[in-house]
Structures are given as C-alpha cells and as structure tokens.
Image (cartoon, grey):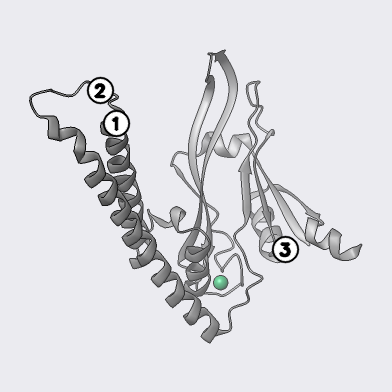
C-alpha cells in the first residue's frame, strides 16, 4: 500500500523558511530506524493565483520555493544519494559536499560547451584581427567533455562504493524516495486547499506524520500492486 498525505495551502503559506521539514515523527521515514539525522530533500515550487499570461510564461501571486525534507537514517541516506544525488547538494555532510561539487562541475561543463557552440556557429561577430579565436571551439568542446567524463566517472565510483556498502548491510532495495509534488492552481488558494501531495510506502510513518501535523491522509493502491493483483 501507499499512503497519500495532503498538505494544505495554509501550511505552505505560513512556512517562514524555504526548508519544510517533516521532523515528526523523528525516526527514519523509510525504515523506521530511531536515529534519523539526515534528510531526503524534494525541491518544489508552489504556484497559485494567476495574475497574468505572457507569450511563454505565466505569473502567479503566490510563487513559493520550498524544500520538503523527510528524515532519514545514515543507511537510507546513502540509498537516497544513489537514487537522486542532485537533491543532496545543500546537505551539510561529506556526500552533500560531493553532490555540490558535482553540480558545479556539470554547470561548468555546460557553460564551456555553450561557449564552444557560440564560437563554432559564429553567433557573435569575432574580431578579424585574431582569426585563431574561432578555432578555440574544438579545444573548448574537448574541455567540456573532459569535465563531464570526470564528473560522471567520479559519480559512478562513489555510487558503486555506496551500493557495495548497502549490500553488505543487507539494505532493503524496495525502499525508495517518496513521490512528492505540488498542486498548482489558477485561483487564489483557500487555507484548506491541497497544496503539496506526498505519496510514500511507509504507511505507519506517513499516518503518524499526518496525524501529528493535523493533515489529511488516505491509503491508496499503487500501480504496481494493481498490476500484481491482475
Ligand atoms: Zn532508514
């Protein structure tokens, strides 16, 4: 079974910090381990109350960035890093710092590749007095590729090491990240409108969390369970 928690708009609008920590119950939200000092982060953008439509964009009266965070134990945090290291970049721990540098590496590689493309396609006029400048594109594309190879190579090495440690600990591979999303709405939000939805497999933790915060929850059948039943 999967448990769905509905977080109302008032909880999002009253939140004074970008961090939206579901710290109660304080045990691991995946395996129920008592010691849960790490977090599973979900960066989201809540939009409601549309005030204008442009050709390519829409403007909302309520445009709030939040990071919903669920408590994790050290072991589940390692599995979380393998699943989605992009969301770990702000975490104050060694894996979080690695994720941060990986993100910087990908950004740097993308910028260098973009610069190479600009030179190759002559997007901007180049000075005719230094004709060799255009030939720099091949060096830059090589540099971008080198950066990507290093970043993805290091990531794969770290993930391999983490997978080995999880296997040794007998980690339950069925435990995954929660599915969390926001519900965008065109009208201004009413306090009880559903704003954030959390679908997670740990029914006991989810029910307790919803109860502690006074939020609505319900048990739903997941698609995989439906397929198994058929
Ligand atoms: Zn855990």
Q: CA distance from mark 3 to mark 1?
A: 52 Å
Q: Neighbour class for label 2 at 10 Å: few (<14), some, many (≥20)? A: few
Disc 2 residue lies near ligand 1 with CB under 8 A: no
Q: Neighbour class for label 3 at 10 Å: few (<14), some, many (≥20)? A: some
State the residue at coordinates (56%, 14%).
51
Residue at label 2? 124
Mark closer to the observer (3, 2): 2
Who is closer to the viewer here, 81 or 11?
A: 81
Regarding residue 192, the answer to whether it shows in the image is yes
Image quarter of the C terminus: bottom right
Q: Which mark is residue 203?
A: 3
For residue 136, side relative to residue 38 (left or right): left
In x, y percent, where is residue 221?
82, 57
State the residue at coordinates (54%, 65%).
26
Residue at label 1? 118
Q: Which mark is residue 80?
A: none
Q: Which callout, 3 or 1, points at the residue further toward the start of the chain?
A: 1
Q: Which callout, 3 or 2, points at the residue further toward the start of the chain?
A: 2
């Amino acid at each position: 079974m999967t448990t769905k928690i509905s977080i109302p708009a008032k909880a999002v609008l009253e939140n004074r910090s970008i961090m939206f920590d579901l710290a109660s119950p304080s045990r691991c939200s995946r395996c129920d381990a008592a010691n849960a000092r790490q977090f599973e982060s979900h960066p989201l953008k809540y939009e409601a109350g549309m005030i204008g439509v442009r050709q390519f964009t829409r403007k909302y009266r309520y445009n709030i960035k939040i990071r919903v965070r669920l408590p994790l134990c050290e072991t589940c945090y390692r599995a979380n890093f393998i699943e989605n290291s992009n969301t770990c970049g702000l975490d104050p721990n060694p894996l979080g710092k690695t994720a941060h540098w990986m993100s910087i590496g990908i950004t740097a590689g993308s910028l260098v590749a973009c610069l190479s493309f600009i030179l190759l396609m002559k997007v901007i006029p180049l000075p005719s007095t230094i004709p060799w400048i255009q030939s720099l594109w091949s060096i830059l594309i090589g540099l971008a590729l080198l950066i990507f190879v290093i970043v993805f190579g290091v990531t794969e090495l770290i993930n391999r090491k983490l997978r080995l440690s999880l296997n040794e600990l007998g980690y339950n591979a069925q435990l995954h990240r929660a599915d969390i999303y926001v519900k965008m709405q065109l009208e201004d939000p009413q306090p009880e409108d559903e704003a954030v939805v959390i679908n997670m497999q740990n029914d006991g933790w989810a029910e307790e969390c919803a109860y502690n915060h006074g939020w609505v929850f319900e048990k739903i059948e997941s698609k995989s369970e439906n397929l198994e039943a058929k």
